[in-house]
């Protein structure tokens, strides 16, 4: 039965890939066909400024480059360095306070200064964007299928049925589970990684000549990330698309980029081929950026199938509880045969998001939780802080059973736990300055006001490396990485005993990520809080966790010491997860990609 399902899934994906390749062969309004190697975008002296505090602030200063058909240009740098705004200005997507000058020529069409009506013909058709935060980019009141259909019917003459069929093909192509059913779901009903895949499907709908990918794999686990990057490479080859890749993940850059632009404070400090930048970086900032990249253990792959782990909690496919520690101190988190079920809604049957979960986190311990998007990682984290009810089993936090606790009983419990949400854009109140968002837990639980509250907020901003003046800004005025740091500061406000960190570094560039991880370890040692660290970045999880738990389809399939999981994984899914991790070296990553493709091809032939 399992083999039949695998074969069916593979056949469905191949049919979607073939249909998607053959179906879209429609004429373009601007320029006709493009040969690989032709210059499709020429940017010269592009400058972006914002009117802030009665003066102009320069976000991008005289940026120049060319992009050729079939080429991937990666723009890297710290959050706030101007890499996103430089690309958003090409489509006229700057806020009202922003102004772009200079030149951006797309196949003979000047984009800077173009009218909104003219830009509407370009957006989605000639240029598409994969935005960084899918929850804020997707419309929450429309189903995800409708939003893909809308893109198709805006640019092509298609009837509703044909557009729906094409949308389902696209959703199959980016591996959305049960695409025919997911077509009718709203964004909030999908996991973070699934929402990102919907964004990618929408961006690829019209096979654009230029694709701006702003952190396209931020919310994706490494296995799906590898599939999406492969899909983008195929798109580049199939229609000679040029890709501007904006990312902080240097492994993704090594996997995709032909050329790299490094930006700092709005200025291009280095520009060269991927081999030149990775192997012979010239600017001190580039050298610092590469030194900040976390590296997964070098022995991964060579020892992946050797030895046996010291700790494994799988017995005949059903996890069993971990053994009691030597000390008698109650665990910070204890889940015993827990099942979490989303109830029936209308005609949609109830869904068991996680079941038979047995997990123990002792005081002061950090456990990493990894797995594919939709595997139940975030569900486990939200249940741990009583944001989701437990249907079966027993949930204990710091010695207190909260399995069936009432809202009144949960109020004092809230002081002992903190959570960093995956999507900083939707977790912060857009109507409050970020300083008030950070101070809100202190006001509600500790009653701090005035100068005392202000001092605590400023200290928290210092701890996450943000200027104190930023407390008066609103979330939409900050970059994605800056918003994520605000979320971390808010979660740490009450010095929790248990912290649920749901992708806390997913939106951070590597240099800031390194500082935040160092800060996290310092704070964890200082205050001794326990942490469930949820992430798709195995290199980050390895750096901060003493043990790693692996989830697959709502089950914990493997739990063990970090070194054992990373170097000697026992479960087939864990081995596949590790093989998909990109490494920040173009030559090594090319070899890993070829090896992984060969493994997947063999699996398909066997199935």
Image: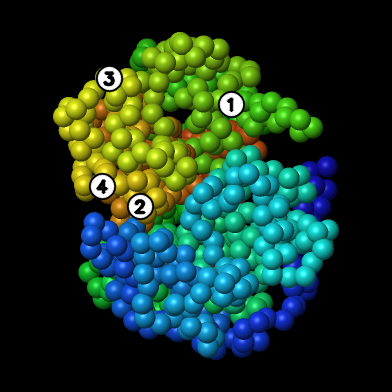
Tell me residue 372's x, y (percent).
58, 45
Which residue is labeled 2 in the image? 477
Find the distance from the CA under tag 2 to the CA under tag 3: 29 Å
Numbered label attached to residue 470? 4
**Is 101 located above or below residue 5 in the figure?**
below
Tell me residue 92's x, y (percent).
47, 69
Q: Earlier in the sequence, mark 4 or mark 2?
A: 4
Q: Earlier in the sequence, mark 4 or mark 3?
A: 3
Find the distance from the CA under tag 3 to the CA under tag 1: 34 Å
Q: Earlier in the sequence, mark 1 or mark 2?
A: 1
Q: Earlier in the sequence, mark 1 or mark 4?
A: 1
Residue 139 seen in the figure: yes
* Image colouring: rainbow
**Which of label 3 and label 1 is nearer to you?**
3
- Badge 2: residue crowd in 10 Å (few <14, some 14–19, many ≥20): some
Residue 592 seen in the figure: no
Q: Are marks 2 and 3 in contact (CB under 8 Å)?
A: no
For the residue labelled by badge 4, is the local secondary structure a helix, a strand or a loop?
Answer: helix
Tell me residue 257's x, y (percent).
47, 72
For the residue labelled by badge 3, is the local secondary structure a helix, a strand or a loop?
Answer: helix
Find the distance from the CA under tag 4 to the CA under tag 2: 10 Å
């Amino acid at each position: 039965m399992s083999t039949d399902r695998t074969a069916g899934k593979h056949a469905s994906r191949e049919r979607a890939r073939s249909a998607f390749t053959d179906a879209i062969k429609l004429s373009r309004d601007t320029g006709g066909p493009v040969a690989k190697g032709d210059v499709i975008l020429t940017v010269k002296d592009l400058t972006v400024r914002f009117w802030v505090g009665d003066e102009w602030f320069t976000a991008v200063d005289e940026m120049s480059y060319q992009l050729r058909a079939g080429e991937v240009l990666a723009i890297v740098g710290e959050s706030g360095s101007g890499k996103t705004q430089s690309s958003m200005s090409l489509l006229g997507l700057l806020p009202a306070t922003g102004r772009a000058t200079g030149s951006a020529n797309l196949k003979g069409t000047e984009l800077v200064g173009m009218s909104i009506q003219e830009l509407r013909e370009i957006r989605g058709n000639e240029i598409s964007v994969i935005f960084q935060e899918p929850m804020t980019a997707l419309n929450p009141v429309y189903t995800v299928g409708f939003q893909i259909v809308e893109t198709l019917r805006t640019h092509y003459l298609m009837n509703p049925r044909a557009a729906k069929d094409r949308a389902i093909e696209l959703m199959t192509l980016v591996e959305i589970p049960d695409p025919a059913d997911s077509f009718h779901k709203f964004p909030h009903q999908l996991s973070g990684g699934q929402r990102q895949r919907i964004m990618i499907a929408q961006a690829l709908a019209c096979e654009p000549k230029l694709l701006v990918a702003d952190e396209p794999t931020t919310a994706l686990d490494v296995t799906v990330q590898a599939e999406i990057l492969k899909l983008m490479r195929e798109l580049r080859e199939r229609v000679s698309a040029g890709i501007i890749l904006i990312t902080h993940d240097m492994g993704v850059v090594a996997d995709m980029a032909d050329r790299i632009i490094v930006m700092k404070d709005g200025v291009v400090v280095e520009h060269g081929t991927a081999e030149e930048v990775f192997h012979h970086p010239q600017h001190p900032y580039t050298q610092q950026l590469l030194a900040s990249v976390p590296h997964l253990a070098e022995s991964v792959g060579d020892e992946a199938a050797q030895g046996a782990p010291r700790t494994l909690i799988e017995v005949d496919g059903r996890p069993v509880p971990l053994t009691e520690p030597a000390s008698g101190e109650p665990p910070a988190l204890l889940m015993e045969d827990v099942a979490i079920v989303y109830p029936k809604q209308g005609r949609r049957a109830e869904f068991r998001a996680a079941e038979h979960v047995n997990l123990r986190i002792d005081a002061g311990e950090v456990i990493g939780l990894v797995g594919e998007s939709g595997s139940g990682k975030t569900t486990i984290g939200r249940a741990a802080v009583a944001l989701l009810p437990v249907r079966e089993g027993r949930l204990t936090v710091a010695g207190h059973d909260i399995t069936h606790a009432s809202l009144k009983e949960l109020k004092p419990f809230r002081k002992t736990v903190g959570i960093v949400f995956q999507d900083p854009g939707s977790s912060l109140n857009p109507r409050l300055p970020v300083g008030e968002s950070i101070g809100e837990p202190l006001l509600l639980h500790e009653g701090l006001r005035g100068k005392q509250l202000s001092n605590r907020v400023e200290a928290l901003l210092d701890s996450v490396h943000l200027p104190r003046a930023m407390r008066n800004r609103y979330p939409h005025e900050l970059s994605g990485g800056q918003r994520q740091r605000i979320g971390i500061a808010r979660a740490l406000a009450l010095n929790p005993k248990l912290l649920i960190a749901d992708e806390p570094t997913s939106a951070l560039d590597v240099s800031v990520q390194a500082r935040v991880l160092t800060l996290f370890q310092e704070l964890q040692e200082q205050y001794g809080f326990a942490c469930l660290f949820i992430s798709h970045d195995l290199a980050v999880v390895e750096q901060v966790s003493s043990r790693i738990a692996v989830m697959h389809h709502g089950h914990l399939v493997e739990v063990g010491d970090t070194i054992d999981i990373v170097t000697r994984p026992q479960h087939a899914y864990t081995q596949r997860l590790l093989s998909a991790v990109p490494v920040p070296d173009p030559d090594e990553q090319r070899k890993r990609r070829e090896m992984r493709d060969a493994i997947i091809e063999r699996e398909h032939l066997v199935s």
